[in-house]
Image (tube, helix red, strand yellow):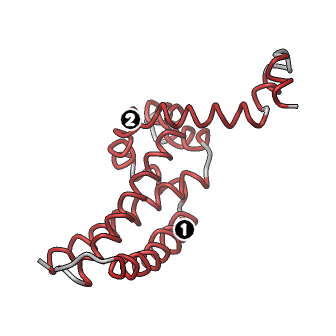
Amino acid sequence: MIAFIWIILIVLLFICTWIAVIERAMLMTTPLVLRHEMEIRGTPARGLWIEEQYESSLQSLALIKILSFTMTIFCFARVLDAEVFTLGNFAIGAAIAAVLYWFFACLIAGAIARAVPVGSVIRNWYVLRFVSLLNPAIQWIVEGVAEIARRLTGANLKQNGGLNPVEEQLLR
């Protein structure tokens, strides 16, 4: 049982690092650059898809990273004591998982993404498409939070030329 949990941990860290590389690479480029590179490589439909699904794909990648981190905490807590799941085991498992997560998903993924930002996204096209299966499920949350942020910051008034007096008064 413990060997199986260690295998799951190794797979989770690998997946988390891979997803983090794609996410960091997407954040280092713009949708327009990715679209242009896809068009140069002869796949304009992929470039158009990335441009249209950029934000929701980033959010799907972040969700997968968080889920893998949560599973890593659980696995470490189970490795520490397979009999009883206590708060102490959870805290130690969380600390170990946080250090490993920082090392793999931040340091290593950041270094890889910084070295080849566009290539990291283009070479992982099928992974990005697979992860984007979550897009419809989280799309309404992503758009809802974005709309709330636009309204609270007044960004929508700047785009409309300040023509909505009710929203202008609310923001004052």
Residue found at the very far left of the displayed protein: 1
Residue plotted at (50% across, 31% down): 48
Residue 49: percent from left, percent from top: 46, 32
- Against 39, residue 124 (above or below) is below
Give the residue type that dot 1 points to: Gly
Q: Crowding near pointer 1: few (<14 within 10 Å), some, many (20+)? A: many
The tag earlier along the polypeptide, 1 or 2, is 1
Q: Any mark on residue 171, and which? A: none
Q: In this rendered view, identify the residue nearer to me: 10 or 25.
A: 10
Q: Position of residue 71 (x, y in %)?
A: 31, 65
Q: Nearer the viewer, residue 45 or 149?
A: 149
According to the picture, the residue beneath numbered tag 2 turns out to be 137
- Residue 58, image x and y in percent? 50, 46
Rendered view: 31 above or below 70:
above
Residue 138 quadrant: top left
Residue name at image x 30 percent, y 77 percent: 86
Quadrant of image for the N terminus: bottom left
Which x, y percent locates residue 7? 20, 74
> 18 left or right of 82?
right
Q: Residues within 10 Å of mark 2 (few under 14, many from 20)?
A: few
Closer to the eye: label 1 or 2: 2
The quadrant of the image that shows the C terminus is top right
Label 2 amino acid?
Answer: Ala
The secondary element bearing badge 2 is classed as: helix
Mark 1–mark 2 Cα distance, whole angstroms, equals 28 Å
Are the residues flagged by discs 1 and 2 in contact, CB closer than 8 Å?
A: no
Given residues 125 and 66, the one toward you in this image is: 66
Residue displayed at 41% across by 66% down: 17
Residue depicted at 24% across the width and 81% down the height: 79
Residue nearer the viewer, 109 or 94: 94
Q: Which mark is residue 110?
A: 1
Left or right: residue 13 versus residue 106 is left
